[in-house]
Image: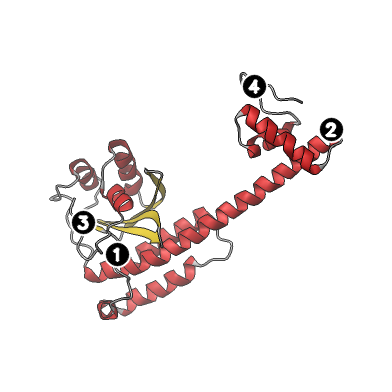
Amino acid sequence: MTPDSGNNSDGRQPAALSDLDGLRALGETEFTALDVLCRSLHVTNADLEGTLLAILNAATAAISGADQAGLNLFAGGRFEPQATVGSAPPALDALQQHTGSGPCIDASRDQVRIHIDDCATDQRWPKFAAEAVRLGIHAMLCVPLWVDDRRLGSLSLYARATGAFDDAAKRLADLYATHGALALLEAQRADQFQRAIDSRDVIGQAKGVRMERHRVTADQAFTLLKGASQKLNLKVTEVARSLAATGEFPRVHGATPSP
């Protein structure tokens, strides 16, 4: 694979604002779209799904030539499509997951920007390119999403026209990806925080059941939950969720925790 030019030696993109002269190629329309984009991504209490869709909808509006888009995460060595705009990205994502090969995977894994000027003539991913053309996609731009040392995945832009992404579109995509990555990380943290709150609540409910049933303190009730968790080889939250909902521990073959 030969990544698109303009990358740093470690595969990451150079800072989008390090060369302000390069941004002069952007017209008023692109700057206006970028302004809307930056404001729309910072929505208080935005849920993860809503944030992902906002990123993709803003991308197709802000970046000239982009007709469809997809956002992918790469975690634990796995390529995980998260959200799409348009009909082609889901099919192309599924193909990449099946074959383990494609521009979105490479951009996510290696954190490089990948540009396909003409899918009909690109030879790097033959099966992917053939399917893209069949679906009416003739050009692509995949931009890595990362924050500090966290490699999040990639943003993939799809165009019906060949040669759709010029240098100005690439620069705007790099700048856009920075904002998109920050918004995605913020949404992930908010989602994780909410999950932590939910887990704390359900554990509190389960502790209440144990305290009522066995007349024990809160600390003793939590110790009982941890003991059941270890015996059942389940997370404490899973044990707590079953206990809070049914008053009983989960039933696992070969394991029978105390009532």
Residue 227, percent from left and from top: 69, 32
Residue 250, percent from left and from top: 67, 28
Other residues around mark 4 within 10 Å, as few (<14) / some (14–19) / many (≥20): few
Q: Which residue is mark 4?
A: 255
Q: CA distance from mark 1 to mark 3?
A: 11 Å
> Which numbered disc flags the more N-terminal residue, 3 or 4?
3
Q: Which residue is mark 1?
A: 13
Q: Residue lying at the far right in this picture: please name it.
A: 215
- For residue 213, which numbered disc appears in the image? 2
Q: CA distance from mark 2 to mark 1?
A: 59 Å
Question: In terms of image quadrants, where is residue 170?
Answer: bottom left
Q: Secondary structure at mark 3?
A: loop
Question: Label 4 near label 2: C-beta < 8 Å?
Answer: no
Which residue is located at x 48 percent, y 68 percent? 40
- Residue type at mark 1 is Gln
Looking at the image, residue 15 sits to the left or right of residue 180; the answer is: left
Q: Secondary structure at mark 2?
A: helix
Q: Secondary structure at mark 4?
A: loop
Question: In terms of image quadrants, where is residue 34?
Answer: bottom left
Residue 155, percent from left and from top: 35, 57
Other residues around mark 1 within 10 Å, as few (<14) / some (14–19) / many (≥20): many
Q: Which residue is mark 3?
A: 3
Other residues around mark 2 within 10 Å, as few (<14) / some (14–19) / many (≥20): few
